[in-house]
Amino acid sequence: MAIIGEWIRRLGYLLQRGAREDELRREMEAHRAQMGEPPAFGNTLRLREEARDAWGWRWLDDLVADTRFAWRTLRHSPGFTLTAIVTLALGIGVNIGMFSFVNGLLLRPLYSDEVVMLDTDSTTLSGDEARDFSYPNYRDIQEGTTDIFTGLAAYSIDFVGLDAGAGARSALAAAVTGNYFQVLSAPLTYGRSFTAEEDRPGAGIRVVIISYPLWEQFGAGADTLGRLVRINGEQFTVVGVAREGFLGTGIPGPEIWLPLGVYEIFSRDDEARTFGSRESHALSVIGRLRRGISEDRAEAALATVGRRLEQAFPAVNAGYAIDLSSSTGPRLFFMPGVGQGPLTGLALLLMLMPLTVLLVACLNLADLLLARGYVRRQELAVRSSLGGGRSRLVRQLLTEGFLVALVGGAIGLWVSTWATKTLMASLRPLLPAAVSLPDVSVDWRVLLGTMAFGLVATLIFGTGPALALTGRAAAADLKRQTGDEGRRPGGVRIGNVLVIGQIALSLLLLAAGGLFMMSAIRSAAADPGFRLDGGLIVEIDPGLAGYDEARGRQAHLALLDRLRTVPGVEAITIASGFPLTGFGDERDVAPAGIPDARSKSVNAVFTAIGRDYARVLGLPMLGGRDFTNAELLPGSPERIAIIDDELAQRLWPGEDALGRLIQLVDEDESAPAPPVRVVGIIPAVKQSPGNPRPSPHVYVPLGQHYESAMAVQLRVAESDRAMVANIARVVRELDERLPIVSVATWRDHIDAGLESLTARAGAGVFAAFGAIALLLAVLGVYGVKSYVVSRRTREFGIRIAIGAHPRALLWHVLREGGRITAIGIGIGLVLALGAGQFLQGILYGVNSIEPVVLLTAPLILLGASFLASYIPALRATKVDPTVALRSE
Amino acid sequence: MMLVLRVLKTQPLHGYAIAQRIHLVSADELRVEEGSLYPALQKLLVKGWVTAAWRASESGRQVREYRITPSGRRQLEAEMAEYRRMARAIGLLLDEA
């Protein structure tokens, strides 16, 4: 209490400084007058200052004075200031950019702390998915926990076919309970949420809530409510628009929300057919805790409900247990097999790169400050001898640093918005559909991060030089003559070490960028095992239009027949997968009729295909025959397959596989797999650009396996843009309800694949970071060399005066620069080799030692650093001996 | 600071009078310099142990008069008790040793 009072009074003194000081002056004058003559009263100004210290604002006065002084000093050397600010702005900018990216995607919570996700486990469930609640179980849990949760919502996420008038496309959707938006505290912008009637399983009331971005696509009009859209082939009425930026429970956010009552339309899972029964575990459950309810109490209540559910329905709910999920909810769920742990690792890796750039920037600044500091040694020595304490001097130097960091950070914030945009743009094509992405703009976390970066940067680059410059030796500098400082080996040596560090780190980033680029080039140039040119792919998914298997098959075949007649089409087929895209259905294949088939099986890519598959890919039949038209329809008694020579070799090395029987080993081994006869053999193709070897494949005729999402493959005379557009038009004309996922040339299709994109995005990002680091390193070399040359003006002057040839001087300076660069490159190469070792495992087709990269990157650095030291060296040769000697 | 508080305990005084009073009461033994008096007074003000107000003195001069506050009195008592304890201890040591 007393402390607070004191602070309030102190603040009063600060705010009414003028009046208070005036009071003090009048008081002291009165005192002096009363003392009579001669006044023994000391220096009033000094006394006033001392008295004022009692108010406790001395530090603030000092800070203001320091800042003013720093401002003046910095303004006097615009070159230094500009370089320092640009360096910091770049260093901080890329960090904030990457940080807001990582923050928006990985760190920022999607919903508040009171919202918890439920987790369940029972012996009748497999796996540890969060999507484990049946609708009746959800309702029972809801009823049993009304005193724990203000609301308990259920949802399920899936892709649907969405047709808003411009043709059907694939869209991310969520089927949710009506209170979902309320539990997530995300009131709708327009319209209403779902009613209890619409929620009821089987209700079939076709209403939809759309996302804000979708609403904007619709023209952002008030008339959007009531508008009709087609979802999975059914007409739905828009009843609401979600809040701007609302992502639901994961990233990316759904585009549309449907009531649970239309689950059968929403999902094509096995669960959809039985949705509403207690056996159909299709839902995830989230709840908002009541105020003051601890998680422990919630878990206890949930456990009670779980036990009750187990007793009431022992058959389905055996071993039923419910608790709160420890994870903060699924994020980035579209990335297969990525949990919370790897994401943290990914975030770290992403942050490592810009941090290296920041480190280079800090080294650079330390360099600059040091070089400048030596110029200022005399000034510092004078101040120190006039009574400036060391801590006071260090504080002054750090204030200068903070001022630079402040301006640099502010500009960095601006640089970062650009960096973030680039990163987001590079992420867009990775996403399966037009989905809502989180807001990655600056929030308080980013601001905090910026301040932290600036602070850390200042401390790193400022403290060292400040301490070095104010050490005990500093006082001795007063006696020194100006020209001598260049000969102090200590300062130059520290500067050199810093430059070596910068060069080494830049080389590391450049080399990493080079490896990514090599990988991108190699994967693009790799021989896929078939003719890539002249191919088109049309991806369709009749299931998204609500077609069942029979109608889906009809749609596939009708499309084949129609496209076959398009002029320019030379051959056509259909397949459930396509090589080189990385993804593929897989089966374990073994010779039929052998015991212990699983252990002898070969993992092969499994594809259902139509006729002419080999012809379209430009492959010869190595033996046997193609499928017949009859085999493309279901109901054929004998199971047959075409395999590639890779699989044949692995199953029966050195023997002819044609006519033999294989079996496709299934997940559950209860039923013996039916034998499949090999009727044809074709050459192997590569399934993944990241795998240099062709993968074994097994192809079955369309009739034996149905998949809704198929790709029609065409070999055309000319695979140009006009042909792509023409094909797309024909497909739409044939069946306007048929969702077209994509129409593209094979090359574009493969380039859009995840693996190619990763390599290219990585190459771009690393190259950009490498370029920035290179720029900073060059600035560093230039700064140190300039400083050295300017310090040694006198020496060069004498050398020239006694007859040194300018070229010899030039060479002398360049050689010194070259030595530093060589050491830096040496260290950098070791680092680059380490990075290569690490990236070798991630990237396609690169070795840890890549001569091209390991030669090019150092050469770039060498050239750049040569240029950077050439200009100062040239200046050394231009020294006028008379001027240099007079400067004493 | 204890001395200043002590002389203010009996009556409110202005700066010069405080110095005079300490000089007088201590039988000319103690002299408080302006260099330590005014910082001390500022500190007391900030701590809230005294308050100050401008007033016309007997001689018609505008002076700033300091007045002790209740919390200042408590502080004085605490400091005096502490001082007496120390003085007694030192006295004992000087007598006995």
Image (tube, coloured by chain):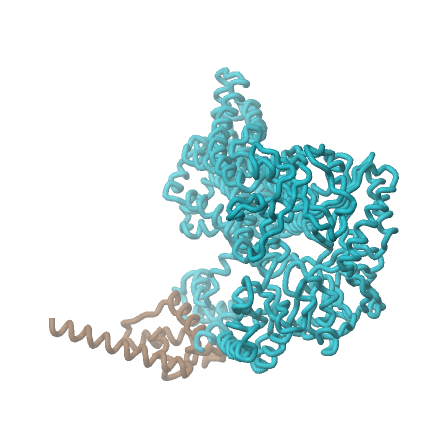
Chain colours: A cyan, B brown
- Closest to the observer, A159 or A760: A159
Residue A75 in sight in this render:
no
Q: Position of residue A475 (x, y in %)?
A: 39, 42
The answer to whether residue A738 is above or below residue A685 is: below
Q: Quadrant of residue A124?
A: bottom right
Residue A524 against residue A302 in the figure, above or below: above
Q: Residue at x 62, y 53 (%)?
A: A335
Q: Position of residue A875 (x, y in %)?
A: 57, 26
* Residue farthest along the left direction in this orientation: B97
Q: Quarter of the image containing the N terminus of chain A?
A: bottom left
- Residue A857: % across, % down: 56, 31
Please report the residue visible at 31 percent of the width from the left and 77 percent of the height from the top. Answer: B79
Q: Position of residue B65 (x, y in %)?
A: 45, 78
Q: Nearer the viewer, residue A188 or A66?
A: A188
Query: Quarter of the image holding residue A531?
Result: top right
Instruction: Examine the rendered structure and indicate whether residue A822 appears above or below residue A808.
Output: below
Specify whether A715 is left or right of A298: right
Give the number of marks. 0
Residue A32 visible: yes
Q: Nearer the viewer, residue A698 or A90?
A: A698
Is residue A614 rendered to the left or right of residue A67? right
